[in-house]
Image (cartoon, rainbow, N blue to C red):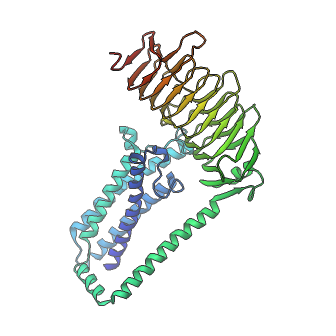
Amino acid sequence: MKRLFALLAAAVAVQSAHYAEHVAQVVQIYWLDLRPPEAHGLLGSVFDFEWVHFLYNVGLELALLLLWLRYRKASRQESVDRGGLRLLVGLILFQGYHSAEHIIKLYQYLFDPYYQFGLHPPPGLLPNATGWPIFLVHFWLNTAVLALMGLALWRLAPPGLLRATLISLQRVPRLTVLSRLLAGMAALAGFIFGAVWIYQQTHTLHVPADFPSLQAAIDAAPRMASILVSPGEHVGPFHIRQSLSLRAVQPGTVRLTAADDGAVVSIYGAQDVRLEGLVIEGGYFGVLIEESEAVTLTGNRIIGAWLAAIRVSRAQARIVENELRDTRGPYGKGIELANTHSRPASVIAYNSISGHAREGVLLHNAEAQIIGNRVMGNDSRGIAITEMSMATVEGNTLIDNADAGLYVVDMSLVNAAENRISDTRPGPLGTAHSIRVEYYAEAILRANSLGQGIEVLHHASVHDAAFP
């Protein structure tokens, strides 16, 4: 009986570690402000994919079933708490439902084109039927499983186990107990650091030390690898199709270039891609992101593209603390988001966006949070929200743009707060406004500092203390 109890205790310990991953994910989303596609818990996205969740939950269900069968067999010869056995039965039924959720999720992941390739997390049964957030549903499912396991462990503990444990500890010299505890902790720490070291060695690639070309390193990189690039110029185009991190060893010393017939860097059908500390110059687009999620661009300088420094199409990205300037074409834009409503909202934050022939930031049929950017010296609108887009525009500085600092049109909806908009220059029609709202669009304004006025045209509406 003690052996069965030890196995049940081990299952509780494993489930506790699994539950810690879900707690970490909730913390990442609600306290660290990560989007659900980027919140992967403590172990990261290497372990956060459908096969791992499926195998873990089905394996736990089988382990609980075997434990119940063994306890039931042992109860014929020894006294076993009946309440504990009933708790095990309830736990098996509940975990069976939990496993069914993951079976459905795996089926969606493998066979539903909308969820394949991990571009959007498959919802399973309950979130699909109710619309509840997937991560919250599974957080509470795992909370219930761990609670039931803890109750079963308490009820099935052999009589006198706690008393016997305390007596045994009293008989062992304290120094021996302390030394064993320290040795165990050291062994565990050594195992963890060893595993991390092995992972880093197998998932960190260096250019040019390990690969002669950057594209060769990208093609050879395992899932979630880090590619560290030494100073120098690399001629593209570069195509990324899997999860990886591409980072300059010294920020600003790695220059990626390409001809004007395509993107310097294109990211297609990928999740968890990160570009950091790079200088990306030229190309039709500097960076083109399509059919992807959880793409992060941070600390890059993207200059001299022809049509757009960054274009996000049917995808989701976090674009943070980049310098985007001086597109060369007559329709050149800083950041363009197109047709992204099927994805989580993108984040455009704390970038410097200047010197473009058209808009600094343009959304059409898209959704984004646009926060804390400096959008200056563009020859069309600073930020344009068009074609039924939705955006939060907060804390931005929009100076010396043409026609309108903030432009909202075509049934779009914007919440704009605490933006500083000034020195808007006349555009092609000879007008200049801090904010213009047109064609059934709606803007909700709060505490903005405006150098010029607000114009509302063609059945649009504005809600503000200064505009009742």
Q: Is residue 224 left or right of residue 464?
A: right
| Image point (33%, 51%), residue name | 140
State the residue in front, 326 or 23: 326
> Where is residue 193 shown, x and y percent of the image?
53, 69
Q: Is residue 192 left or right of residue 326?
A: left
Residue 450 visible in the shown view: yes
| Image point (64%, 50%), residue name | 247
Count the numbered circles shown.
0
> Where is residue 346 shown, x and y percent of the image?
51, 36
> Where is residue 254 shown, x and y percent of the image?
70, 47
| Image point (48%, 24%), residue name | 421
State the residue in front, 235 or 17: 235
Judge whether 178 appears above or below 264 on screen.
Answer: below
Q: Is residue 445 left or right of residue 308?
A: left
Which quadrant is home to the N terminus?
bottom left
Judge whether 338 appears above or below 240 on screen.
Answer: above
| Image point (56%, 70%), residue name | 194
Which quadrant is home to the C terminus?
top left
Residue 409 visible in the shown view: no
